Amino acid sequence: MNKFFFIVLFLFSFIGYSQEDAWVFFSDKPNAQFYFDNPLQMLSQRSIDRRSNQNIPLDIKDIPIHQSYVDQIIAANGIAVMAKSKWLNCLHIQGSIDNIIALTLLPFVNRVQFADASLNSKRAVPRTIIPVNKQMNVQTSFNYGNSNNQIQMLNGHLLHQENYTGSGKIIAVLDSGFINVNSTAPFQRLFDNNLILGGYNFVSQDANVYSLHNHGTLTLSCMGGYVDGELVGTAPDAQYYLFVTEDVTQESPVEESYWVEAAEEADRLGVDVISTSLGYYEFDNPNYGHSYDEFTGDTAFASKGANIAYSKGILVVASAGNSGGSPEPINHVGVPAEATNVLAVGAVKFDESYANFSSVGPSFDGRIKPDVMAKGQAAVVANTSGNIQTASGTSFSCPIIAGMIASFWQAIPWATNQQVVDFVKQSADRFANPTNQFGYGIPDFQLALNSAKGSINQDSIGRFLVYPNPVLDKLFVSFSPTFSEAKISFYNALGQIVFEKSIQNTETSISMENINSGIYFYKIKCNSFVQTGKIIKN
């Protein structure tokens, strides 16, 4: 990967690999019904509540991997198990080619997939999948000091003034380490208010998160740091889990597996937002590296995991990358920021101009990436000594946005993760004219909040919520309980009807596949009620 420790780039080259990285996928989960009947055995109540609030049912991906399968892989000749994913029902393993291929003879193995894609067409043998039946007083008048610019750029200070500071929301930070977070002044407020809920190191498989590497310390400070008159994070009253998924000694695809493992734990614990200032493109073994044509939204392992996290109601925010100054195609947004349902964040300077290092779009399949922008050049952060300094990279624009997302979501607790993303994108300054450098631009969270409050009035007649916007294939219309059916019409810039459809509250998805890309206006009519708006078709 071009490690989106977006401060220093490490690139190592090695030859003579005798061990290969691979994933072994299992055919089923024979213990599934027990967990469906006893969901608290696999998920926390908060995780279940998040699903319920967003109308997300439990599914097979929630079920843990069958332990007997894991045990047999561990016992297999020459195989080392490095990580696991219940979402993808697989283990990340290392071993010789022959020993990995031998696993396909086990009756419960569906397939093996090598990290070296050239080995898959020759070696891997797929089989048919067998299906399976606390409150605290909020400080609202902060002295932001030098961090004023990075939050006022987003109108985030206005949300803070309305008591929206992330309280009640949980953010998981997936990073490389959090040196001295537990002992320096900028984070003391978090501990005083019991806002650090825990942490885990998925690389070393222990709780050691406070004594290795500084990158997570810097990124966390953008959200939760507090030094009066110097630094106030964008979500100073959110709660946090700190997860180490990055192995700073190497560049390896196993780090993507650690990332997915941490995302699954975040889901289990009931996390609302994942902030990750990591990214993957090239690895030490050049055979493992991603190519640009893989950036189609759901191909890379970490991108698949990020999309599943989204499907569980989590909002994933990721750094776009620091390769903007690199030649094509390395300059493009990497994994997992390129994923379909990840909010990829690029970097701007203090004056809202483009930071030249920020990775650009589009994705290989033409989607807008990055999605939004925030200050990433000379961002104000706290270092491991507790001093306030500046640092540059999309590593910092990402958590600045992630913290604001948590504060914004606190203000509209009824919203789904997709609705939150839609409101944020639509508030951005280039929403109608996105570019490869800026995406949809710099969000205005006060504008987003005004729009959200205007879209649904829970005390009187509700409105329809139309999402996602922009839309690619399917458009959804969320009905107020007041309405049972309506008619939606789409108009081009000349006011001509290009498409209309009758919709009911029992069937709210509309196929947009046959509509050309562009900006359209819509009108929803139900009896005497009329709602209009604008939609972008990608």
Image (cartoon, rainbow, N blue to C red):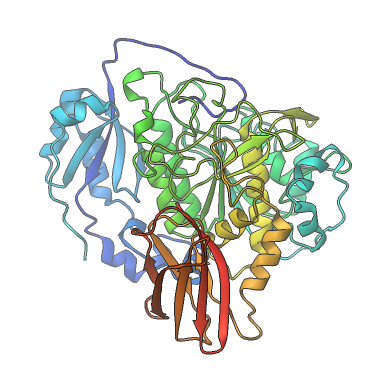
| Residue 15: x %, y % from top left | 33, 10
Between 470 and 376, the one nearer to me in the picture: 470
| Residue 123: x %, y % from top left | 14, 29
Q: Which residue is painted at 80% across and 53% down in the image? A: 157
Residue 109 falls left or right of residue 22: left
Q: Is residue 42 above or below residue 299?
A: below
Q: Which residue is painted at 57% across and 27% down in the image? A: 322
Residue farthest along the bottom direction in this orientation? 527
| Residue 10: x %, y % from top left | 52, 17
Q: Is residue 285 above or below residue 451?
A: above
Residue 261 falls left or right of residue 127: right
Q: How many marks?
A: 0
Q: Is residue 168 above or below residue 459?
A: above
Quarter of the figure with the N terminus: top left
Residue 77 visible to an observer of this rendering: no
Q: Quadrant of residue 371?
A: top right
Residue 305 visible to an observer of this rendering: yes
| Residue 254: x %, y % from top left | 39, 31
Residue 468 falls left or right of residue 295: right
Between 403 and 29, the one nearer to me in the picture: 403
Q: Is residue 134 above or below residue 292?
A: below
Between 277 and 435, the one nearer to me in the picture: 435
Q: Which residue is painted at 36% across and 44% down in the image? A: 298
